[in-house]
């Protein structure tokens, strides 16, 4: 009888140990990946509104998909030591101007880092406060070159999925209606760049796109990529990221939200999970 009880205790001890070890292993595994979002959130109220919206939306998505989401408006953090803590970098509105920060970001990307940039993160216009003085970033990395023009007012567009095989577009319909946005036109034709994989473009059914009042702010035809990746890097550029704002009545009230669109959100979530190495 004593021997029998001892055997039962040994078995019970083994079972408890197994569950304890499993629990410790699960806790030690931590988040699937870590994201750091850089932002400036100055000057343009539409971009400020988007940044505030993004910094509320992404933490909710991070909880749901088990990754971490941190933010910083201190661009001095764009250095090798700080970036080594993160698997994915987001630029929510602007880009770095300091040569050391630019060099650190380039090294990060060339050594396997991942990046997603929204809307104004791709902007460059000479002369302006954001001149095209970073050839690697605008011509090689993003590939679009300089900003040329945009639609106005911020308007929803019908977007067409160009590459249905990419993980970012999985489960998306052939076409869908976006959130309102200010759409950019670029100096470079991305279709001529073999490194660029265009994932989404503006469908012809969107035209005329924009309401003006200036005629050049209304597009009637043309080909306009809005989401793409560079096959030499783990990156994604998303032209969305400009909320509609009540400038006319000087209330600066947000009239539209980028993340109030289920299909568009699926694209961004898919893209982020792909960048983070998740299926």
Image (cartoon, rainbow, N blue to C red):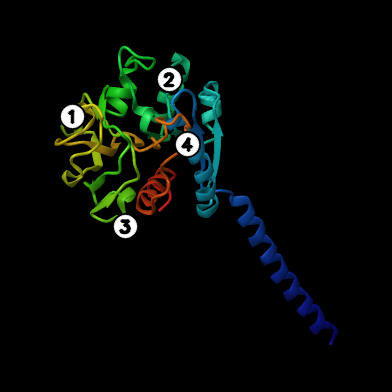
Q: Is residue 1 in view?
A: yes
Q: Residue at x 52, y 48 (%)?
A: 62
Residue 48 image position (x, y, % from top left) = 48, 31
Name the mark on residue 102: 2
Q: Secondary structure at mark 3?
A: loop
Q: Please identify, in this view, whether the residue under mark 4 or under mark 3 is nearer the observer.
A: 4
- Distance Cα–Cα, label 4 vs label 3: 34 Å
Identify residue for label 3. 171
- Distance Cα–Cα, label 4 vs label 1: 35 Å
Q: Please identify, in this view, whether the residue under mark 2 or under mark 4 is nearer the observer.
A: 4
Q: Is 79 left, or right, of 7 in this rendering?
A: left
Disc 1 to disc 2: CB gap under 8 Å: no
**Could you classify mark 1 by the number of other residues whose Cα lies within 10 Å: few (under 14), some (14-19), or many (20 or more)?**
some
Name the mark on residue 253: 4
Q: Earlier in the sequence, mark 4 or mark 1?
A: 1
Q: Secondary structure at mark 4?
A: loop
Q: Secondary structure at mark 2?
A: helix
Give residue 272's quadrant in the image: top left
User: Does residue 145 lie above or below 237 as drawn?
Assistant: above
Residue 169 image position (x, y, % from top left) = 30, 50
Q: Earlier in the sequence, mark 1 or mark 2?
A: 2
User: Does residue 267 lie above or below 233 as drawn?
Assistant: below
- Distance Cα–Cα, label 1 vs label 2: 25 Å
- Most distant residue in the top direction: 127
- Distance Cα–Cα, label 3 vs label 1: 28 Å
């Amino acid at each position: 009888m004593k021997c029998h009880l001892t055997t039962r205790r040994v078995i019970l001890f083994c079972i408890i140990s197994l569950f304890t070890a499993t629990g410790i292993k699960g806790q030690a595994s931590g988040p699937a990946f870590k994201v750091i979002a850089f932002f400036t959130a100055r000057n343009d109220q539409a971009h400020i509104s988007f940044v505030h919206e993004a910094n509320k939306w992404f933490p909710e998505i991070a909880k749901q998909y088990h990754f971490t989401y941190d933010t910083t408006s201190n661009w001095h953090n764009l250095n090798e030591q700080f970036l080594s803590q993160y698997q994915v970098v987001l630029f929510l509105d602007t880009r770095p101007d300091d040569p050391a920060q630019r060099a650190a970001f380039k090294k990060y990307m060339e050594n396997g880092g991942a990046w997603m940039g929204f809307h104004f993160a791709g902007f460059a216009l000479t002369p302006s406060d954001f001149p095209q003085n970073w050839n690697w970033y605008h011509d090689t990395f993003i590939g679009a070159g300089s900003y040329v023009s945009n639609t106005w007012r911020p308007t929803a567009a019908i977007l067409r999925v160009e590459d249905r095989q990419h993980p970012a577009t999985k489960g998306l319909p052939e076409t869908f209606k976006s959130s309102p946005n200010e759409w950019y036109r670029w100096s470079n034709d991305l279709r001529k760049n073999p490194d660029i994989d265009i994932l989404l473009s503006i469908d012809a059914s969107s035209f005329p796109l924009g309401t003006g009042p200036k005629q050049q702010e209304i597009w009637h035809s043309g080909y306009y990529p809005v989401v793409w990746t560079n096959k030499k890097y783990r990156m994604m550029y998303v032209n969305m990221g400009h909320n509609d704002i009540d400038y006319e009545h000087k209330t600066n009230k947000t009239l539209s939200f980028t993340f109030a669109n289920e299909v568009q959100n699926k694209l961004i979530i898919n893209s982020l999970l792909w960048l983070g190495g998740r299926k």
